[in-house]
Image (cartoon, rainbow, N blue to C red):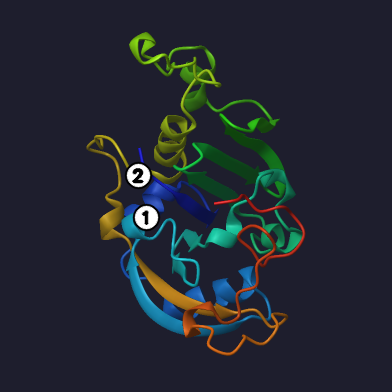
């Protein structure tokens, strides 16, 4: 399992239905979306990609798309250890729509996802074998139930002297199932006939410049300009970003 995500969505209804009819993203609407998520930042158009290759962009890139019924943003700065602490301006940008945050990282087996309905947090989960359950707010969704009930344990091999896995299930397995349930596609595993093919969903690319970032030092690469670190991913202030 090597899937990684840093994905934020604003949806009028079912995300999968909207992505199935997505077509080409609206350039003007996507630029307006980026301006809402990163207010005041400089924006430069870059080469786009497809959703299946863009859920965890390189550090200096943002991928996004505005489609009828759903807006998507992929950016590492959207990876929060506690999703419930999503900055207020990101919730305000929803304007009453459903908000879905999905982040996972295969190196640390970390998963976090959250859903807001009409501005109210319905569900937030963040966990990893090293950090345990950091956040577990709201009732689990139906797709989670087999995992919490012990039906998806991580098998250890006694011959290798493996310790029992620190969680009752593998976070990335649940994370992949959450992608299917909340977005309608998988990054790993065998897709079902009704699943979206993420390689058929185009996204636009952007290079962003933080207006509060200090000037780059001499010799700094152009790709790194405007990116300041705070010990994690980011540059959006306030909540703690997940280390990756």
Element type at mark 1: helix
Element type at mark 2: loop
Foreground: disc 2 or disc 1? 2
Displayed quadrant of residue 45: bottom left
Q: Residues within 10 Å of mark 2 (few under 14, many from 20)?
A: many
- Above or below, 37 against 219 in this view is above
CA separation in Å, label 2 and label 1: 10 Å
Percent from the top left, x then y, of residue 193? 22, 37
- Above or below, 147 against 10 in this view is above
Percent from the top left, x then y, of residue 190? 24, 34
Work out which residue is located at the far top of the displayed protein and give it: 158
Percent from the top left, x then y, of residue 192? 25, 35
Q: Is residue 191 visible?
A: yes
Percent from the top left, x then y, of residue 76? 54, 60
Q: Is residue 11 visible?
A: no
Q: Which mark is residue 185?
A: 2
Q: Which mark is residue 146?
A: none
| Residue ID at (43%, 46%) | 183
| Residue ID at (41%, 31%) | 173
Residue situated in front as seen by the camera: 43 or 233: 233
**Tag 1 residue:** 19
Work out which residue is located at the far bottom of the displayed protein and give it: 218
> Count of labels shown?
2
Residue situated in front as seen by the camera: 193 or 156: 156
State if disc 1 and disc 2 touch (CB < 8 Å).
yes
Q: Quadrant of the N terminus?
A: top left
| Residue ID at (36%, 13%) | 157
Q: Residues within 10 Å of mark 1 (few under 14, many from 20)?
A: many
Disc with the residue nearer the chain's start (2 vs 1): 1
Displayed quadrant of residue 185: top left
């Amino acid at each position: 399992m090597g899937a990684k995500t840093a994905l934020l969505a604003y949806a009028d209804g079912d995300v999968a239905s909207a992505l199935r009819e997505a077509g080409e993203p609206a350039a003007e609407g996507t630029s307006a979306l980026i301006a809402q998520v990163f207010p005041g930042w400089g924006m430069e158009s870059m080469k786009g990609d497809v959703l299946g290759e863009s859920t965890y962009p390189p550090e200096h890139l943002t991928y996004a798309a505005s489609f009828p019924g759903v807006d998507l943003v992929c950016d590492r700065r959207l990876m929060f250890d506690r999703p419930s602490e999503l900055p207020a301006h990101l919730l305000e940008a929803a304007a009453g729509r459903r908000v879905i945050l999905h982040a996972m990282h295969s190196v640390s087996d970390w998963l976090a996802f959250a859903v807001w309905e009409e501005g109210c947090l319905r569900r937030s989960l963040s966990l990893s074998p090293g950090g345990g359950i950091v956040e577990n707010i709201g009732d689990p969704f139906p797709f989670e139930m087999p995992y919490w009930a012990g039906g998806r344990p991580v098998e250890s091999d006694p011959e290798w002297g493996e310790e029992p896995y620190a969680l009752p299930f593998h976070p990335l397995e649940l994370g992949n199932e959450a992608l299917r349930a909340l977005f309608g596609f998988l990054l790993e595993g065998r897709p079902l006939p009704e699943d979206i093919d993420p390689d058929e969903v185009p996204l636009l690319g952007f290079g962003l410049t933080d207006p509060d970032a200090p000037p780059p030092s001499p010799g700094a690469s152009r790709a790194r300009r405007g990116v300041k670190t705070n010990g994690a991913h980011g540059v959006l202030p306030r909540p703690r970003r997940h280390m990756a």
